[in-house]
Image (spheres, helix red, strand yellow):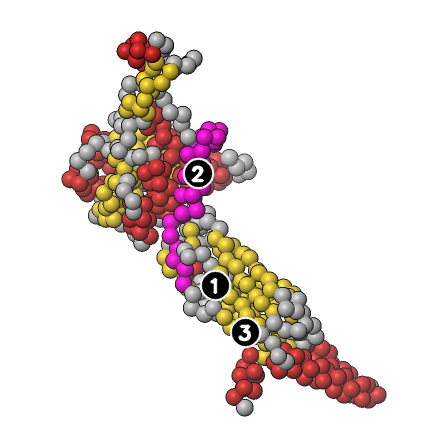
Amino acid sequence: MKQLIKWLKSIYINNFAFYLFMGILVLFLVSQFFPSLLNVAWLLTYIFLGFVLLDFLLIFVSNHSFEASRVTPEKFSNGDDNPVTVNIQNGYSFPVRVKVIDELPFQFQERNFQLHRTVQAGHSTAFGFYLRPTQRGEYHFGKLNIYVSSPLRLVARRFIFGEGAMVPTYPSYLQLRKYSLMAFSNNLFEYGIKKIRRLGHTMEFEQIKEYVSGDDIRTINWKATAKKNQLMVNQYQDERSQSVYMAIDKGRVMKMPFNGLSLLDYAINSTLVLSNVITRKQDKAGMLTFSKRVENFVPAGRRTGQMQKIQESLYNVNTNFFESDFGRLYAEIKKNITQRSLIVLYTNFETLDGLKRQLPYLKGIAQNHLLVVVFFENVELEKLIHKNADNIREIYDKVIAEKFAFEKRLIVNELRKYGIYSVLTKPENLTIDSINKYLEIKARGIL
């Protein structure tokens, strides 16, 4: 009896069977006006019930084994397409039609996720799909529901697997791998994220080598030339062990969304990738976040485990609606970062007045460190600027959009007046532009 109750709880009527049943009911109604159809209706009813019983026996009673599992990454990469696979093993002696309904984490807001496939007898198959998280944190999966139907497709049996799985979502480590390979490849200069190493006296001595056409004659080593009886030159490389800090503004200005991600998330992803490039360039990477106070301070370093410290610090960083305190940022940097360093400040200024309120603190930071302010273009305004205006209201909107876009360029000029470097970028180009600026600074030897 318990087994029968269990079967009844897991049995479902397919749409095909439902339509057949409704057709028979219609036939019974019509037979009220045409009595000769009554016997036909009963005959079809008996046939229908017979096939339903046969389908029930095939799915529930016959010897079989049916297995399924959900395979997810150990952690999701925020803002990227992450692969998820559902593996199915059909142990029935006949091909089955399966419908997969996976209860995805609520963050995806997906309520009609279904996959359909026919699996041959004794075979296995895999359903592959991608999930793109836009928030960091824990993603809890629900039940993996598999509805199995025989070739008759009248009834279906539900199997439940993989309940309660949890996958944490971290800052974009997929971008970290992608840009790391590109930044250190010898063949990808055309991507614009690698600067050719400059030879010059502002950099650390690397080695003495034979002169070749194109070498700077100012680097000729006359003592080595006399010993070797051929021209020898000194070769220099970028200075190493320089400290680079990423300062992330997590105030209200970083709450603005773009393609599902907030500006804060873009800054976090960029920080993770840039930190990896910095450590592989033999420099020291550190970070901090700030709003009303400075938090998540990680001292600059390049030892084993530094990237893990930065990633764990970025995992739980969330924005808030407070006005960021740049005065507190200036005080903390002056107190805790005593060596001259490169400070990459991720923030956002929409107006020149907004910059001028914080300019005294930025100038104070720039007195002791090399400061690069990274802020964002408003891509929605760009769309409005390039849109054709058809009426007075649209003309007015376009003029206002152009005014705000112009103020962004004024901000760049204002920062340049005080020797503060800046990067004005679109959110989707943030990572590559940040790497470019770091490599440019290293190539110019201005840190």
**Identity of the amino acid at label 1?**
Leu
Which residue position holds label 2? 181
Q: Give SS at disc 2.
A: helix
Taking the image as shown, residue 44 lies to the left or right of residue 272, namely right
Residue 15 in view in this figure: no
In the image, farthest residue toward the bottom: 1
CA distance separating discs 2 and 3: 43 Å
Q: Is residue 63 above or below residue 295?
A: below
Q: Is residue 114 above or below residue 300?
A: below
Say the numbered circle drawn on residue 159. 3
Q: Tell me if residue 189 is in the magenta stretch.
A: yes
Q: Give SS at disc 1.
A: loop
Which residue position holds label 1? 104
Q: Nearer the viewer, residue 70 or 245?
A: 70
* Residue drawn at (53%, 83%) of the image: 6
| Between discs 1 and 3, the one toward the N terminus | 1
Which segment is the magenta one? 166-193
Q: Tell me if residue 318 is in the magenta stretch.
A: no
* Residue drawn at (36%, 22%) of the image: 198
**Identity of the amino acid at label 3?**
Phe
- Asked if the residue at tag 3 contacts the one at tag 1, i.e. Cβ–Cβ closer than 8 Å, the answer is no
Q: Give SS at disc 3.
A: strand
Q: Nearer the viewer, residue 235 or 281?
A: 235
* Residue drawn at (54%, 90%) of the image: 1
Mark 2, other Cα within 10 Å: few <14 / some 14–19 / many ≥20: few
Which tag is nearer the camera, tag 1 or tag 3? 3
CA distance separating discs 1 and 3: 17 Å
Q: Nearer the viewer, residue 48 or 66?
A: 66
